[in-house]
Image: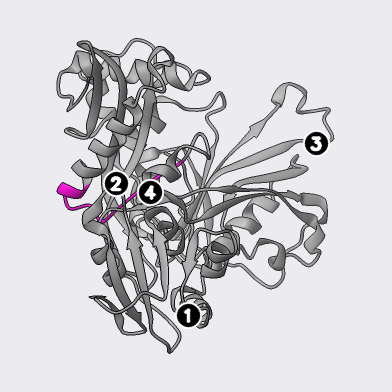
Amino acid sequence: MTDVRILHDEADLLRANDIFRTAMVGLPHLGDLGPGEITELLEPGRTLGAFHDGAMVGTADSTGGVLTLPGGARVPHAAVTHIGVLPTHTRRGILRALVTAQLRDARDRGDVVATLRASEATIYERFGYGVASHSTSWEVITRRAHLRGDADRPVRLVAPDPDLCARIHTETLGQRPGTIDRSPQWWAFRRRNGSEHPGYLALCGEPGTETGYARYRPVDTGAWFTSGQRTVVVEDLVADTPATFAALLRFLLTLDLVDRLVFTALPVDTALPWLLTDRRAARQLSVSDETWLRPLDVTGVLAGRRYRGSAAVVVEVVDDLLPENSGRYRITPDGATATVDDAQLAVGAAALGSVLLGGVRWHQLADSGRARVVDPAALADADDLFGWPRAPFAGFWF
């Protein structure tokens, strides 16, 4: 019998952290933590432990915050992370017990959605999580890269400062769907686990009213002075407007002794190549799933987002893990309401999570068998209703 409970004792929290890192195999352990340090890295009351025969064998935790829906509404959100079960106790239903307890706890707290970053792509769909956004990485060959037009916003260098980055990120949260805030615990992890090179921080805007920043560092510095491929990695780029993005890009392109810039996380609709006179100076390196979204309150999240188009569609949602979410919803450009009308489309919780932010289209779900189509004419209407001009994007991992 698996017993899942919220952890409060510091020794239990330390054990949970070790269990997670053991389960992940490739992540380094944090080493010795002083008294009270673990509580700075975990939000109180949100860490769960799974116990088997009295011993902790699994864990999961989350932090609270907000997520931006299409239309700009921000809803309570659980950022789920640190899920792991010891390799000696996998495939015994412990993960299911952990995740179910975590989802119910988050729902009871008033969280409308939960999101996570998946270490494996085959695990979380069965718990109602669906891929809702993607992240791209890009390289820019600096000798070929020249910006179109002007980007005259002031950019200055300062010492790396997580507190300053945290303030700017919070103050510049935009309206792009999928945007989430970064918790104090996320920043605490960043302070503790810096890269080998401390890196550099470029700010855009006047002191106190910055509109964005770029945090960057060199890699493979052992042969820096003789290499023909000196690379700078842009690990974190925050920009509240296209003008801020262009100004930071112009600054990065002026760095001496740099042959190649690598941007680790940009939205799929980034303007990067279009800003360059030679768009082939920029090359997309990868596209990866970013946000896995799980509806916790279907009524609340459907009512919170905005819709486009001019038609109306009745969607049936079937949620086996949280049956209270199951029901039919009439969705129009004016909003979403519960209904008893016959369904035109039917989906599970994971499929609904994928389309909620506008980054996945209904016809993709139908073509892959993840949406049941009762009325074929409703498919195009649903695509119009749920579509959004900006691709969803969060821009960081947790």
* Mark earlier in primary sequence (1, 4): 4
Rendered image coloring scheme: one colour
Pair 2/3: label in front: 2
Q: Please tell me in which quadrant of the rendered image residue 264 appears.
A: top right
Name the residue rendered at 82%, 51% in the picture. Answer: 143
Q: Which residue is mark 3?
A: 229
* Quadrant showing the C terminus: top left
Q: Which residue is mark 2?
A: 321
Q: Is residue 220 above or below residue 142?
A: above
**Mark 3 and mark 4 in contact (Cβ < 8 Å)?**
no
- Write down the region rendered in magenta: 107-117
Q: CA distance from mark 4 to mark 2?
A: 8 Å
Please, what is the three-letter code of the amino acid marked with disc 2? Leu
Q: Residue 163 at what x, y percent from top left?
A: 34, 41
Q: CA distance from mark 4 to mark 3?
A: 44 Å
* Mark earlier in primary sequence (3, 1): 3
Q: Residue 160 at what x, y percent from top left?
A: 46, 37
Q: Which residue is mark 4?
A: 128
